[in-house]
């Protein structure tokens, strides 16, 4: 190795193993402070990341030095670390000690010692591995790693003291120097190697660095394979030497370094194709929730906004083009004269906010998409008018098209149904000025419910007759109705009838099939007269009389029917009927064959509030041909106003139209033909209320009967109330034919028997049907009279004179007298005997069994007479109750007990729980009831217990023999429990039959109980739940050992091993297979069990008493056996001596005797060792005997000594 010293100005480090950098030092005191300061500076072409440096010195390491960095190409410097042999004196202002943070600047003594004199290293790491780094991507870490320049300042040398020798004390202020200049050359800084580790700084946005080029594209620095260049080859849309900026037009997010897997790529600005440049605005970025901060610059195509997403003022976005279209913004088309803000329009489309793109905002009186026309009601568009147009004087709703006036001239033009100079009124009989095309609506008042066709001009409300409502007066009030044409109907069956018969008729199931009113008809003949009372007319007017009738299968009809109106007095001269003549009150009419009603002409005048009688007299059926047998059914008469006289059908073309329509659909005939309201044609239904309003001048009150109706509301047309079951009539005020009992629940059906009654019509109040003859009775005529049965034949009851009535259907007698019973009262009641039949008539008497009824000891419910020749003393036989026997039941039956002959005495069944044979006499005591002959292995006074050796429930006959395992049962404790069957088990034996060991026990076969398993919990296998398996084999007691354990309890080493398993010291047995009885050695000491002749710990040598070469060993013989007996005797004596010596020692010997006892113990041990030797001579035995005698003497003296001094 050689050294080459460069000039002071040359700081170059190259080929460190051959050359080294040297800086000479001038130690002259006048320049000492300057000359010791030397630096190595690395100027990098760009920003780099610096991680650590390693310096290897040829000379002593500096006594003090500083490592500094610059991140702005040398403009400012910051220290990394101070190094000094003595930090306190060299850098007094810099703290010592280990840093707590990576950015802490401290001074350290490490790397500043004098030793070694050469080859010393200095290592500095920017990020210390001893300091925990919470966030490796933090700004603190990034700033520490970032450098453009690195400077190493050597500030102090280590010297050996000769720099203080031989320097002159005489000097000038500016000439202080050393006498020997060779000292200067002796001290210098010399560096073998400087390793600076780091990487080009690209903030994670580049994979590699490339040479920096000039403007011509030529690399400024040479490209060597081992050189790290400073220019990053940027990705992630970044630029700059260190990728420290975002590329142009990629400023939507702030520039950030890549962190971990997050590249933090620069994002392209979204300018929708309307800008070429953008910039990042932090305020915009924050306002967006840190999503986007790019702001587009110089938007084109009439756009604006941070993303060029809006159209400029006076432009709007075309909703049919995408925002990226260069023609997306169109100019507004607003008329400036009628628009606000000089014609600016809505810039975008937004249905949620109600915005329409391009929409113009008109002045208050202007309308139209372009704000180019006046609103309806305004005229004269002008730019000078702040409202755009002037107001018309016309009423807007009354003008044509709701335009108000002519938008150029201001002239009003009225709609068709509007009048007035300003088009502000409806025409007569119209109302509701509105924006409808006609302007107003017709009043359209109901032709009957309203007094006329005039209505309120605002609401259209017509003037209604009494109890009519609705705007048109076309609806009856609640609880009122429009009466039908035949409202004045008078029933024939309610008239005064002479020579006529009322015939009621049940209502059909379907109302449409009904051809009559009321309850039926009056069958009239040629002499019948019916007088109807009429006193309920509400209007004075002309009426037609209509007769309703039925003439089935009559081809002729009835030619002569006379109708006479009987007035109580002459008509009032001032009334409507003042012109009526008496001849007008007499009419003759013919009832046509096949017809149902006839309307009489002419009409007659009747006044309201006056009672009339209308007499209907039936004349000859055929004129001049009397027929006394002829008859016809008259239903009712009706008073109905003639249609022609009603004002709604005359006086105007519209009324004539109504009359034509009413006649065309035969509405009058439909009503008189009893057509239900629900079946009327739509046209006829429409005329019900108008006709009723004219005829009655009001709608009529429902007046529903509160008992027969569901509610007080009736049908609006016809007035039919909602009736309860079987209730009829408009008011629901009577029962239907065939029902009765009008009440809150309606009416009940008569249900008259079809055989026993004449018809299904019953009394309205009682419901009594009209019965036929032959003694039939009952409300429904469905029963026989008392004493008869078998309806409808009604035969006489046969009861042997002991009952008055019998069952109507079966004939069985009811309520038999004289203690009799039976279908025909033909036998005595239970408890009595006799023969009550007619012809025999033996009275019924109490049974003597034995004491008779109410005696307190009667034991039979029935008895009977046994045939006997003695009629005065009949033979009575009792039917004894269970448990009694004998003709009079005076004895207890077999296997019953008690005294039946005393007051209250009974015979009870022996209670043996079913464990005796009831057919075997004497199975129980007849007096006490105790059981005697118990069966099924039972015993006890009630056979309630199992016998010895059996168990179970004797009461259910389940006693069975005890089953006890002989090996597990204690036979001295007796048989098993008589109820449970549990045997008396030996210790640690369980089970009903003592047939199993208790858990963790084994060896049931021992016959003395089971032994504990005692499994070692540390040596057994584990269950699934992690607990040790402590159950052993039930036969041999072996526990389930884990690997490495053995023995029965798993507390030893596994088979063929020995040692302490708890200490992990299990060793394999080494037993010789030739000499061993088993391969398993002693588990504690490893000794083997030898076969005869073999011996030694491993059974691989001849045993004591044998000789020869193993394995061929032979017994020594009788001589050895005798000799060995002597040796064993000596051995026993030695053992006793050792025990005595130990006892003396245990009492506490004074220290002065310790040596004596130690010698005795040593001698005893030697003797014992010799005795254990297999080969010993007679001389040896003699010597041992003498030695033992001496020891015995010493031990005895010691015992005496301690007895004297210690009393023991």
Image: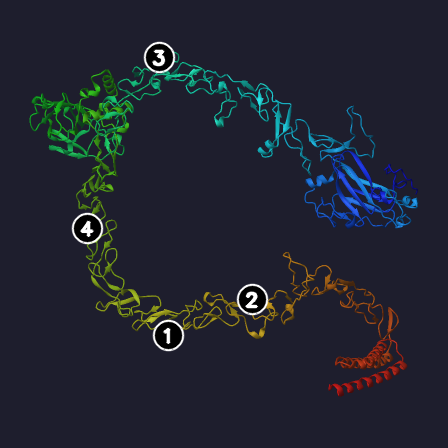
Read off the residue under disc 2.
992
- Residue 411 shows which numbered tag? 3
49 vs 114, nearest the viewer: 114
**Badge 4 local density, few (<14 within 10 Å), some, or many (20+)?**
some
Separation of residues labelled 1 and 2 (CA atoms): 41 Å
Quarter of the image that includes the N terminus: top right
Name the side, left or right, on which 352 lies relative to 1037.
left
Read off the residue under disc 4.
786
- Residue 132 shows which numbered tag? none
Give the foreground label among 4 and 3: 3
In the rendered image, is residue 322 in sight?
no
Are dots 4 and 3 in contact, CB under 8 Å? no
Asked where in the image residue 730 lies, by quadrant, the reply is top left
Compared to residue 910, the image places residue 1152 above or below, namely below
Are dots 1 and 4 in contact, CB under 8 Å? no
Q: Residue furthest top?
A: 409
Read off the residue under disc 1.
927
Asked where in the image residue 599 lies, by quadrant, the reply is top left
Precedes in sequence: disc 1 or disc 2: 1
């Amino acid at each position: 190795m050689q050294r080459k010293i460069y000039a002071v100005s040359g700081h170059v480090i190259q080929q460190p193993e051959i050359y080294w950098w040297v800086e000479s030092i001038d130690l002259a005191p006048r320049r000492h402070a300057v000359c010791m300061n030397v630096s190595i500076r690395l100027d990098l072409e760009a920003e780099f990341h610096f991680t650590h440096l390693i310096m290897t010195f040829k000379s002593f390491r500096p006594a003090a030095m500083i490592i500094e960095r610059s991140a702005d190409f040398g403009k400012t410097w910051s220290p990394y670390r101070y190094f000094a042999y003595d930090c306190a004196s060299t850098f007094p202002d810099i703290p010592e000690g280990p840093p707590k943070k990576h950015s802490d600047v401290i001074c350290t003594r490490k790397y500043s010692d004098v030793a070694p004199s050469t080859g010393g290293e200095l290592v500095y790491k920017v990020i210390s591995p001893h300091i925990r780094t919470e966030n490796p991507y933090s700004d603190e870490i990034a700033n520490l790693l970032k450098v453009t320049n690195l400077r190493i300042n050597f500030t102090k040398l280590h010297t050996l003291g000769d720099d203080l020798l031989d320097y002159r004390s005489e000097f000038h202020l500016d000439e202080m120097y050393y006498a020997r200049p060779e000292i200067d050359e002796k001290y210098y800084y010399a560096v073998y190697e400087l390793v600076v580790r780091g990487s080009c700084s690209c903030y994670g946005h580049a994979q590699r660095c490339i040479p920096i080029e000039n403007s011509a594209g030529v690399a400024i620095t040479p490209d060597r394979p081992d050189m790290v260049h400073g220019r990053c080859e940027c990705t992630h849309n970044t630029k700059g030497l260190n990728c420290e900026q975002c590329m142009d037009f990629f400023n939507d997010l702030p520039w950030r370094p890549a962190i971990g897997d997050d590249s933090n790529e620069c994002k392209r600005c979204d300018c929708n194709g309307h800008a070429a440049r953008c910039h990042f605005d932090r305020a915009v970025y924050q306002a967006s929730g840190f999503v986007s901060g790019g702001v587009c610059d110089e938007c084109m195509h009439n756009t604006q906004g941070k993303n060029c997403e809006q159209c400029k003022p006076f432009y709007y976005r075309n909703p049919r083009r995408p925002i990226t279209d260069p023609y997306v913004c169109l100019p507004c088309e607003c008329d400036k004269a009628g628009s606000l803000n000089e014609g600016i329009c809505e810039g975008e489309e937004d249905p949620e906010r109600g915005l329409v793109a391009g929409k113009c905002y008109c002045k208050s009186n202007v309308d139209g998409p372009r704000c180019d026309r006046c609103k309806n009601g305004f005229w004269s568009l002008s730019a000078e008018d702040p409202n755009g147009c002037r107001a018309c004087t016309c009423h807007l709703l009354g003008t044509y098209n709701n335009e108000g006036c002519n938008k150029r001239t201001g002239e009003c033009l009225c709609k068709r149904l509007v009048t007035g100079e300003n088009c502000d009124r409806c025409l007569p009989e119209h109302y509701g000025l509105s924006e409808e095309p006609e302007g107003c609506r017709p009043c359209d008042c109901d032709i009957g419910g309203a007094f006329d066709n005039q209505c309120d001009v605002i609401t259209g409300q017509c003037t209604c007759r009494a109890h009519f409502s609705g705007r048109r007066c076309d609806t009856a009030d609640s609880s009122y109705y429009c009466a039908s044409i035949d409202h004045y109907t008078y029933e024939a069956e309610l008239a005064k009838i002479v020579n006529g018969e009322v015939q009621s008729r049940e209502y059909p199931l379907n109302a449409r099939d009904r051809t009559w009113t009321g309850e039926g008809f009056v069958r009239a003949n040629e002499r019948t007269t019916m007088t109807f009372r009429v006193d309920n007319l509400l209007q004075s007017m002309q009426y037609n009389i209509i007769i309703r009738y039925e003439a089935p299968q009559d081809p002729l009809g009835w030619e002569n029917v006379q109708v006479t109106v009987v007035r109580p007095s002459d008509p009032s001269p001032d009334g409507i009927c003042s012109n009526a003549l008496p001849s007008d009150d007499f009419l003759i009419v013919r009832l046509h064959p096949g017809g149902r009603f006839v309307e009489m002409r002419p009409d007659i005048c009747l006044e309201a509030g006056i009672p009339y009688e209308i007499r209907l007299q039936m004349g000859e059926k055929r004129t001049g041909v009397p027929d006394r047998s002829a008859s016809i059914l008259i239903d009712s008469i009706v008073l109905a106003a003639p249609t022609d006289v009603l004002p709604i059908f005359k006086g105007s073309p519209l009324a004539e139209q109504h009359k034509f329509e009413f006649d065309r659909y035969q509405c009058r005939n439909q009503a008189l033909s009893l057509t239900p309201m629900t079946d009327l044609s739509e046209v006829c239904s429409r005329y019900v209320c108008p006709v009723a309003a004219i005829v009655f001048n009001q709608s009529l009150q429902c007046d529903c009967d509160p008992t027969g109706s569901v509610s007080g509301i009736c049908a609006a047309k016809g007035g039919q109330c909602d009736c309860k079951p079987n209730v009829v009539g408009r008011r629901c005020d009577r029962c239907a034919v065939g029902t009765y009992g009008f009440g809150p629940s309606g009416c009940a059906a008569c249900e008259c028997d079809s055989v026993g009654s004449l018809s299904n019509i019953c009394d309205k109040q009682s419901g009594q049907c009209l019965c036929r003859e032959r003694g039939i009775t009952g409300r429904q005529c469905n029963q026989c009279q008392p004493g008869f049965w078998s309806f409808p034949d009604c035969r006489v009851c046969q009861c042997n004179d002991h009952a008055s009535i019998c069952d109507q259907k079966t004939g069985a007698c009811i309520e038999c007298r004289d203690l009799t019973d039976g279908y025909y009262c033909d036998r005595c009641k239970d408890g009595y005997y006799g023969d009550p039949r007619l012809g025999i008539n033996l009275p019924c008497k109490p049974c003597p069994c034995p004491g008779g009824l109410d005696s307190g000891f009667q034991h039979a419910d029935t008895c009977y007479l046994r045939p006997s020749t003695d009629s005065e003393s009949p033979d009575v036989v009792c039917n004894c109750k269970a448990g009694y026997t004998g003709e009079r039941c005076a004895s207890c039956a077999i296997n019953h007990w008690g005294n039946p002959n005393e007051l209250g005495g009974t015979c009870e069944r022996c209670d043996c729980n079913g464990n005796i044979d009831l057919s075997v006499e004497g199975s129980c005591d007849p007096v006490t009831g105790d059981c005697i002959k118990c069966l099924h292995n039972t015993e006890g006074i009630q056979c309630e217990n199992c016998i010895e050796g059996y168990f179970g429930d004797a009461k259910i006959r389940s006693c069975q023999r005890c089953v006890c395992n002989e090996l597990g049962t204690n036979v001295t404790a007796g048989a098993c429990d008589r109820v449970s069957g549990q045997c008396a088990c030996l210790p640690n034996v369980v089970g009903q039959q003592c047939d199993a060991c208790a858990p963790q026990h084994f060896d049931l076969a021992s016959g003395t109980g089971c032994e504990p398993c005692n499994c070692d919990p540390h040596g057994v296998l584990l269950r699934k739940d992690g607990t040790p398996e402590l159950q052993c084999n039930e036969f041999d007691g072996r526990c389930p050992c884990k690997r490495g354990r053995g023995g029965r309890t798993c507390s030893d080493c596994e088979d063929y091993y020995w040692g302490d398993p708890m200490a992990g010291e299990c060793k394999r047995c080494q037993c010789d297979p030739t000499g061993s009885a088993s391969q398993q050695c002693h588990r504690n000491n490893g000794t083997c069990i030898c076969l005869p002749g073999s011996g030694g710990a491993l059974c691989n040598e001849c045993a004591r008493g044998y000789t020869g070469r193993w394995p061929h060993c032979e017994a020594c013989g009788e001589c050895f056996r005798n000799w060995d007996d002597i040796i064993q005797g000596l051995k026993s004596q030695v053992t006793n001596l050792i025990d005595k010596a130990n006892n003396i020692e245990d009492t506490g010997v004074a220290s002065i005797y310790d040596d004596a006892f130690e010698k005795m113990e040593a001698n005893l041990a030697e003797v014992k060792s010799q005795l254990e030797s297999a080969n010993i001579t007679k001389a040896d035995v003699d010597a041992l005997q003498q030695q033992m005698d001496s020891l015995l003497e010493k031990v005895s003296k010691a015992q005496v000594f301690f007895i004297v001094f210690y009393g023991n």
